[in-house]
Every structure is written in structure tokens, then in C-alpha cells.
Amino acid sequence: MTVSQKSSVPTPAYFGLGIWNVYFIGKFALAYTGYLRLDLLLNAAFFLFLLIPIRGKWLHRLHALVALVLGTALLWSESWLPGIDSILANKSGITGFSVNYVVQLAWDFINFRMVGWGFVILLAYYLLRDFVRVTTITALYLVFLIVQPFLMAPTAPVRAVPAVAADTPKTNEEILNLANAATTTDAVVSAEEVETWYKAFLDYEKDRVAQLPTGISAKDTPFDIIILNICSLSNDDLEASNLQNHRVFSRFNIRFDKFNSATSYSGPAALRLLTGACGQPSHDALYDARRPDCEIMNRLDALGFKQHLFLDHSGAYDNYLNTMRTQAGLTATFEQRKFPLKYMSFNNEEIADTLAVLRHWNRVMARDKDRRSVSLFNFIALHDGNRLPLHSRWEAFEPRAKTFLDSLNTFINELERGKRKVMLVVVPEHGAAVRGDRIQTPRLRDIPTRRITQVPVLVKFVGLKNLPKEQIHVTGNSSYLALSTLIGRTIETNFFSNSKGAVPLENLVKDLPTTHMVSENGQAAVLEYKGRDYMKLNRGKWEPYGG
């Protein structure tokens, strides 16, 4: 045999992952730090797909293209990013984003620290690939992850017995009480147990209705109710922006410390507020048939409180105003006026100056001379992506929030100088997600975590000169039913009939209805059970929230 003949004999080839090793090593690192959840079965299948030997240039390119698509889809499904269902569910809102906002959002989404670590892994791979068979190491680690659960010896119990066992309580109220049962930090209950509790919660909430008076005596002291529904302001946002001690907060008589807005999007939040005279429904039930007994504005209207509506925007985005009318029965007319311009919104809509909108209330009251009124304000000045006029870059949250709170403080000063008695209620829709966590990045609100849904709800009684200066705190878990009940008690006790209040403030808030922490969007839900937060995505199974 000649030398040329020997060189033509095919030799065994080592088929490795090549650059795909970086993909898997990066995912292993992200999963270890909690930023990713590995689907071991799909990763093993994808690993084997990549190892398939391909002969021929065009087949090799096709294989590489398919691998790129599959790898991207797999990585996305294992991340905490919104899924396709979630994106489609919010397509009406997303399509309204301006191009400038989308570009800036994408840029701000990049985690440069992770990108830096990615380059480190890539560099290490190129330095070691000629000395170490990296694919072998990657394969061994993947196999280790797969067999690890079977090799580990059983430890202390990490899964509790489901709440529906034969010797456990069966009534909804008894099941709900399990949420407050003592538990260790490491205890994780089964998805079935959490689902059982969640269904019991919804069944229990269906029968709850706020108690409001059936009528008002002519002798009762008239007063106005102002409800400020503010987009993007949570307790966590205030802490992240060092605004939790803004002077305006100390001016309120009552503060709810653990008020859950129950959602992280504006439309559902407004519906929950306007139908808050009943217990908390599921997200899907919000869009079922109207429930007149739950519509707080209409129930107040029936008692003689004339409805008014004030917005710092047009109400057109995401069909906001029409949804409030068709789903929550809002009948107040909206008179869009030309206010001083403050911001340009994320969808290039003009946003009016907050103080100008608030001051317009005084002019309307002076013109209509209503003895009793209930006014709903909706503000989007703090929504993500808003920018100053003639600016292309979005304005940071902190200066916008400070300006808003300063405007609110000025408005309170003007109310106190007026002659009308007012029950002023601040109830934000949800937070702005100023700071995120390992699962959900800042500014993203797809998963309604408590950082986003726990909002500062405050109540001030204007026109009563001798109220106690000490602020009353409602410390229990609460939501819209408690707020509606408080409004009902204010009317029922004729609270404004005495300069120091017809009854002590403590009596107004005593035994207000509590509501367990359950929050939902269309494709994600978060609840607290036995001291731990659980999450369900895309109607899947409940799992501990590790953010």
C-alpha cells in the first residue's frame, strides 16, 4: 500500500459540541444561581441532537440553523421571561409602545455583568479546547444533574401532606386558615396542596360583600370622596427611590401597611378597584358578566354621591376607559381638557401636569355645587418609559415620583384651605418594578410579585380640625374589600359630623376584612402560603418563588 493510499483511509472523528459547550456551561451557571430553571430532559435531547454527525455542507448548515432555533426556544422557555401566551395576551398594549421606548427597554434589559461572565466562559473555552475535551466534561455534568435526585438520600421532609387528606379540614374557611400555619423556612408543600388552597380562596371570596348603608339621612353631614388611582407606585419602589419618608405620607390619618393590589397591570387593577365592594375574584372572572353589588362607584352613586372622573391622559391606551365602562359600570362622564403638558408617554401620548388635574377638581366642585360626590382620578405620570417633552430618553422614576408626591402635598394644602369636607384615598394600581430580582428584571411586571403588588394605600379626612395627629396603621393583609368597607363605615357613622370624628379612628379600621396575598395576571399568579411565596406560570403547576 502506497503512502497516498494510507492517507486516504478515513480515520475516526471526534464529534464534539464545539461552541455549543459555551451555551450549556452558561446555562448550568445561570441555573445554579437561580436565574434559570433547567429542563433536564429537553436539554439531554438537545445535547444528543447536536452530537448527530452531519456529512455535507448544506446539511451541516441546515442542522446548525435548526439547532440555533431550538437552542433559543429552549433557553427562552427555561428563563423567567414572558412566554408567547403572555405576550399575545398583552399584544394590544405592547403594539401601542413607541419604537423609541422599545429600543430603550431592550437596551436597559441587557445585564452587562452577565454578558461579561459570558465572555469569560467563551474565552476559557477557546483556551482549553485544545487541551481538554470540553464536550466530555459538559456531558458528564449533564448526566450528573439527571441522576443526582436518584442518588441523594432522603432528608428531612420537604413536602407536606396535601391539605385534602382524609383527616384534614374540608370547609373553605378551614382550608384558608392553613395559609397561616407555622412552617419552617425550608418546608415546601406540593403543587396540589397549593392549588387546593387557591381554589378554596376563590370560593370563599365569592360570598364576601362590603357593608354599605342602604340610605343616607338628610341630617348627615355631606362630604366628598376623592380616590386617586396611581399607576406604578409600590412600597418597594418608594424604598428603592429613598422616598418612603416623603413628608406627604405623614399627613394621612390611616395607612394600610400590607395592601395587595392583586395584579401588576393597569387594566385589571382599575377593574379590581371599581368592583372592590366584593371579595377578590380570579383574573379571568374580572372579565365575566358585571356584578352590580361589587361596583363601589355605582353603589356610592345610589347613596347620592355624584360620580366624577379625572385623567391625566386620554383613556384610549389599551382601551382603558371603555373597559371601565363595560366591565365595571363606570358612568361618570370624562371631559378631556387642555392641561399644561408634563410628560410624553411610552406610546407618545401627552400626559398632563398632575397638580393641574388635581386643581381642576376644585373648579368642577365650585361649578356643580354637589353636596356629595365621589371622584375617581387615574394618573399614569409614573408609568415606565415616560419622558419630558422634547427629550428622547425616558425620565428616571425617582424624580417623577418626587414631583408627583410634591404635587399631592400641595393639593392637600389647598384642600385644607377650602371649605369642603373630603375623604381623600390614595390607592395605587401596582408598582413600577424599579428594582427586580433573580427571576424578573427591573421594569418587567409580567409576574405579579409582592414587590410590585404591595402598594401604599392611605386615607385622609380633610375638614376635621381635631383628629389625632398619630397615624393609624392597618397591619393585616388587606385589599379592596377592606377599603370599600372603610368607605362604608365613614358614611354609616356620619364621621364628618364631629370635628374630631364621630367615632375614634381606631373604630373605623377595627376588624376590617382581611384578604390573603393572592395576585394574578393573565398568564402568571403569585400567592403566599405557609410563609412562602408560590408562583404559577401559564396555567402550569405551583412552585416556590425564588426571586
Image (spheres, grey):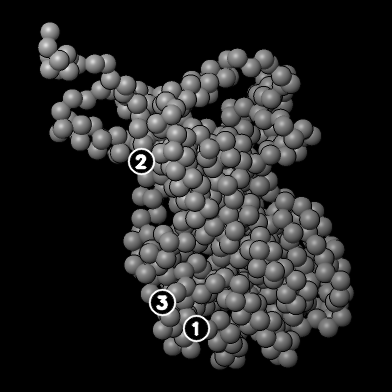
88 lies above or below 490: above
Residues at marks 1 and 2, CA–CA distance in whole angstroms: 41 Å
Residue type highlighted by circle 3: Ser
Residue type highlighted by circle 2: Thr
Locate residue 25 relative to residue 468 in the image: left or right. Answer: left
Q: Position of residue 119 (x, y in %)?
A: 45, 47
Locate residue 178 relative to residue 137 in the image: left or right. Answer: right
Residue receiving disc 3 = 392
Residue type highlighted by circle 1: Lys
Q: Earlier in the sequence, mark 2 or mark 3?
A: 2
Q: Quadrant of residue 186?
A: top right
Q: Are marks 3 and 1 in contact (CB under 8 Å)?
A: no
Locate residue 315 relative to residue 499 in the image: left or right. Answer: left
Residue 342: which numbered mark, if any?
Answer: 1
Q: Position of residue 266 (x, y in %)?
A: 50, 61
Residue 545: which numbered mark, if any?
Answer: none
**Residue at point 43% right, 61% down?**
107
